[in-house]
Amino acid sequence: MKSKPRTRERQLKHKHYAGWLYSIPGFIFLILFFWYPLILSFVVAFQHWHPIKPPVYVGLNNFQLVFNHPLTPLVFKNTLIYAGLRIALTFLIPIIVAILIMEMRKSTIRIMMILWFIPISGVALTILWKYIYNPYYGLLNAIFVGLGFAPQRWLSDKNLAMLCLILPSLIMFAPGLIYIGALQTIPEELYEAAELEGAGFWSKIWHITLPRIRPVIAMLLILAVISAFQEFNLPYIMTKGGPGNATLFAVQYLWRTAFGYMKLGEGTAIAILLFFFLLTLTIIQRKFFRENVDE
Amino acid sequence: MPLIAKVGRNKLSVKFWLAFITSFLWLGVALHLFPVWWMFTSSIKPVPEVYKFPPTLWPHKPTLVCYKLFFQAIGVSYKGEYRTVLPFPIYVYFKNSLIYTLGTMVIQIPVCALVAYSLSKLHSPRWSRILFLAFITPLLIPAQIYLIPRVLLFKNFPYAFKISSNLPSVNLMNTTWVMILPFCYDAFNVLLFKGFFDTIPESLVNAARLDGASEIGILRRIIIPLSKPIFAVVSWFSFSGLWNRFLWPLTVLTEEKMWPISLRMNLLQTQLESEHLQAGMSEIELALREIGLGWNLIMAMGIIQSIPIFIVFLICREYLMKGIRLRGFK
């Protein structure tokens, strides 16, 4: 009889130890590769890095150089336009598709899930689009000419390049799977109950589906905004920032500054500006979407 | 079928509505599949057809010449000058990609699972909240800020600065480690794991504890067998994310023999597109065309690069719908 509480105590102790033990590997990686570099970047931003000589503290000089650089306003304008357009045009599509796919028969859902969210390597697909956009032998111009329009220069056209970068993201996406996962957790009784009260298609979406998946939408919106502002692969592969810097975005700008021109301090200063900008955006979004759903 | 009322499904308007949704979805599927198909047909087209305008929808003379380059390096001579096109056969890059991706996953998935499990079931509620915040913030921090400091960190691992010559530090640039270490922890995976572990009832774990099971035993005999779906989900997200890495290898891998396949594809594409001489062809492109290669080679590499992702997707597919239990940042 007496031994029972003691075993219980020991078990709680074990649970406690196991908790910390299991967290340790994660902690090490977290500190070494996330928190440490984060702090480091706030050090580097105030330094001048020379390839051979030790770094020198230069105060706010890097930030001044970035602010006075003629490209900076253009880059931030481009990034804003691109990210804004991409979120506006592509964020809703996977939500709509996921909701509609759930209307299909079970067997159809299975097939459609594979086909809609069929995975292709992002880099490969981006390069494929470059082939499609080719003004001389690309598919898009063939379609255009076939329909009787004048052929376009697409990625080499200052006015079209930005749109050309967004078009591929209209069909490349995976978050649909997360929405489907979220939609599946909604109990069917809710819909049946609503049906008895005479709720129709739209009112069910509005009053049941959307509130239920709102936390997931809020989270993915935050992640989508963060990643849209940090897009690098698409412009780097397709246009290299051209024509005439029309598609030069923030991350490529800082990458080029830091590793192309070897101005690590200035590059870090750009990174920190973008960091604070995105942090503000995230905080605003968190305020807008409070996460507590009535349960 | 929760949205459309079960009663009255035979009504004409409802039928019409359903047909409309169905056709919309299939249209999307077609649009979505088209690039895949285009990549595939282009990869088996012979050179004259790849550059034909207007392009042919299906190759008249399909050829597998590009896929044969999986085991063969190529170069061309142009105006007496030798230029490498693929200094290594494709399988070298492919192998690198596999090593980087699988090597990272082997560490990343257990690390993240353990963290999520301890947050969900082991820590006291108060500590759990605090630690969760610490573990999840990397998700909210734009990853670009890590780029430069991490490069410095790996050039002079693990200090970033030359502190003194007594302290040993190594340069890990151009090694496999540089592609593995920074990705061993992933906050999104922790979120996925925790969302799932939270749905496993606490009472189940407590009951096992009362029966005298050790913590490791609980993990091994109860949690892991229950969690197959979430391991599949995380493997899928992790694999596709890691396989597609581009910016980081571009920054840290300068030696070509270490490159993943995505970097080589991009360079090849740049070589073809950069120096336009006549009718949109670069020098290398003209020389390559003489040996029957061009965009079909890049497309073949694209297909080769997509195959592993597709295989992992097929393996994990059964569990994908069951395993995702995300509830936002909570």
Image: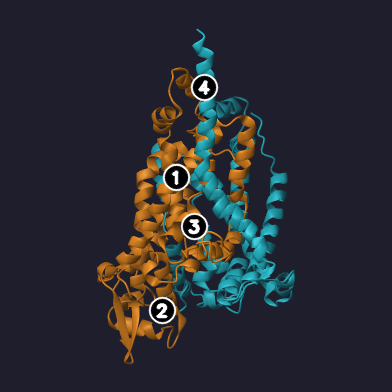
Give the Cα distance between marks 1 and 3. Answer: 29 Å
Same chain? Circles 1 and 2? yes
* Rendering coords of residue A70 (x, y %): 70, 78
Q: Are marks 2 and 4 on the same chain?
A: no
The residue wearing badge 2 is B272
**Real-space CA distance between mark 3 and mark 2, rounded to the nearest whole angstrom:** 26 Å
Q: Which residue is mark 4?
A: A10
Viewer-proximal residue among B215 and B119: B215
Residue B297 lies, in percent from the top left, at 33, 71
Residue position marked by numbered label 1 in the rendering: B109
Dot 3 crowding, Cα within 10 Å, few <14, some 14–19, many 20+: many
Q: Position of residue B157 (x, y in %)?
A: 51, 61
- Where's residue B87, x and y in %? 33, 75
For residue A74, side relative to residue A142 (left or right): right
> Seen in the image, is B320 located left or right of residue B129?
left
N-terminal label among 1 and 2: 1
- What type is the residue that disc 4 sits on? Arg
The colour of chain A is cyan
The subunit carrying tag 4 is A
Q: Give the colour in which the image draws chain B.
A: orange
Q: Please report the residue visible at 43 percent of the width from the left and 27 percent of the height from the top.
A: B218
